[in-house]
Amino acid sequence: MPAAQESAIPPSTAPSVPRTAAAKALYRAMTGAAGPAATGWTGPPRYPEPPRRGEKVLILGAGVSGLTAAYELSTLGYDCTVLEAQHRVGGRNRTARNGDRLYELDDGTGRPVPTHTCRFDEGLYLNLGPGRIPHHHRRVLTYCRDFGVALQPYVMETTANLVRPPHLARALPNRRVANDIRGHLAAKLAETLDGRGPNGADGADDGDGAAFTAEVRDLLRIFGALDADGKYSVAQRSGYLHDPAEEEPVPVPAPPLTFEELVGSGFWKTRFYQPLDYEWQATMFQPVGGMDHVVMALAREARRAGATIVLGAEVTEVALHPAGTAGPDVTVGYLVDGEERQATARYCVSSIPVPVFRGVRRSGFSAAYETALGVVEFAKTCKVGWQANRRFWEGDLVGEPGAGNAPDIYGGISWTAHDITQIWYPSHDFFTAGGVLVGAYNFTDAAARFGALPPAERLRQARQGAAELHPEFRDTALVPEDKGISVAWHKVPYQLGGWADWQPDREDHKEAYRRLLQPEGGDLFHVTGDQISPLPGWQEGAMMSAQYVIHQILGLMPRTVPDVIGVPDSVALTQGMV
């Protein structure tokens, strides 16, 4: 390693603890010491001055983490070049619009083949990857604010959304299921009250067990909408059978679903309660006009700061030359239009998904690091998008009274036991002519089955599943076949999955996660992205990881982590409690 390229803080003198309070909070979050879903946010990053002078950094991949690293490092004076295999920035942050072509790897040859050409009307779009921003993902929100990305609310749930449980042959409005089960459980709990105090003794803890019981009964009365006798019979919370008509001016409340029917339906197995989990709690946001406005802004600001972004540059080889060897620190080989090229740098930051990076030739990597790369797998996940020429979900009455085909759905998600799993309704452009629905978003076995189908068959099955919630899907004039698209992320070139599928109870995952949090070759090679963060599948995790790596490059963060750390639970963080 030439003396002129030595690190400002050599590995031997790198800190064993973070140097600032912000670095400490980020370090604890990244290593899992701060608990599940921690982001380590203490405000926008503040890096030391003066900036570095021209040290070269090669950043592999122009997704959210790669662009974040390119922007921040370029602002600090590093000479950053981003190599992106696709002819667009964003990675899994992709918004499909009219004319966009989608490709997936052929099951037989492994070569990219076209699957769909998006034919949505001008102005309509579908977020194929990330589609929402939680209120507590402050890095994403801060970059959006600073870079002028306009945001609007994303509606996660309305009481008009539908659920079709696995053991029920009809769809029901959210409000009936949620409020009827609440009422029944409250009534059953009220039956058990016997005048005991809060800790079980007759008045021993609060001096008046009867008074305490009376308060609990009153709580249950309000909580479950019970009558004066503590029974659940009918509640306006659950809605009405239909809107009042001229001949029937008083609306008829929907009769309660029986406790047995609700339990027998298995409604909670449809991810019905996902909106209660922390990652999806209100208020959520989305960029006006599509999620890709986030990466377009990052790319614009990275270029303004001096970064070079090379599109269509497929990385084929990474060679590390640790201290004490002659020549450059890192050499990267890549292809542009079939032409072999090579670049060298002091640092390499890779946001290439690990399953893709395994296909890149490597030298200078340790056996332990190679083992870690072999452990990480990505989750299977699919999405479907449909253009509807009329926003029928916003006002049409369909079916017989009480059939569950409720009107007046303005945003939110309907859930079903069908392999499509869910339907998202647009949270924007209400009362306009048409709109785009997410017609499927599934995981694990459902995604494996769905992704294995030919694209046309995916759409056929997606239409069938959606029609179980909304019969309007049977009308191909209303929901045209040629305006449907699908994506199986585990088959998308240069992606090969939705997110890193970490499992906290696996010892090999703990070791792989620990190893990939550390740079390889001393301080030469860093893995970044939501794939190596406490928030897999989220843009906040990608930005966290980029800032963590920047701290390591600057010498503000330890380059080693403890032997025992927390590994993210990818299922809980991307799908909720299942």
Image (cartoon, rainbow, N blue to C red):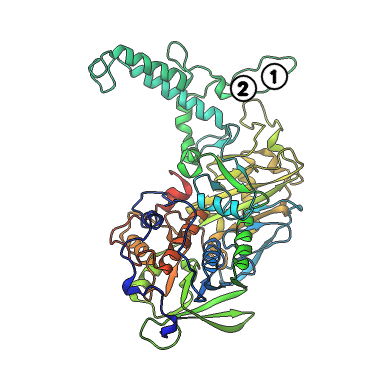
Q: Mark 2 points at which residue?
A: 240
Whether residue 538 appears in this view of the structure is no
Coordinates of residue 307 in the picture (x, y in percent): 58, 70
Mark sitting on residue 244: 1
> In the image, what residue occupies the spot 47% across and 53% down?
444
Within 10 Å of the Cα at label 1, are there few (<14), some (14-19), or many (20+) other Cα atoms? few
* Secondary-structure class at tag 2: loop
CA–CA distance in space, label 1 to label 2: 9 Å
Q: Measured along the vertical axis of the image, is residue 479 above or below residue 488?
A: above
For the residues bearing labels 1 and 2, Cβ distance under 8 angstroms = yes
Coordinates of residue 193 in the picture (x, y in percent): 33, 17
- Is residue 235 shown left or right of residue 1? right
Q: Which of 87 and 375 is in front in this view?
A: 87
Q: Residue furthest front?
A: 50
Mark sitting on residue 234: none
Looking at the picture, which amino acid does disc 2 mark? Tyr
Looking at the picture, which amino acid does disc 1 mark? Pro
Q: Which of 81 and 333 is in front in this view?
A: 81
Coordinates of residue 503 in the picture (x, y in percent): 37, 55
> In the image, what residue occupies the spot 34% across and 54% down?
566
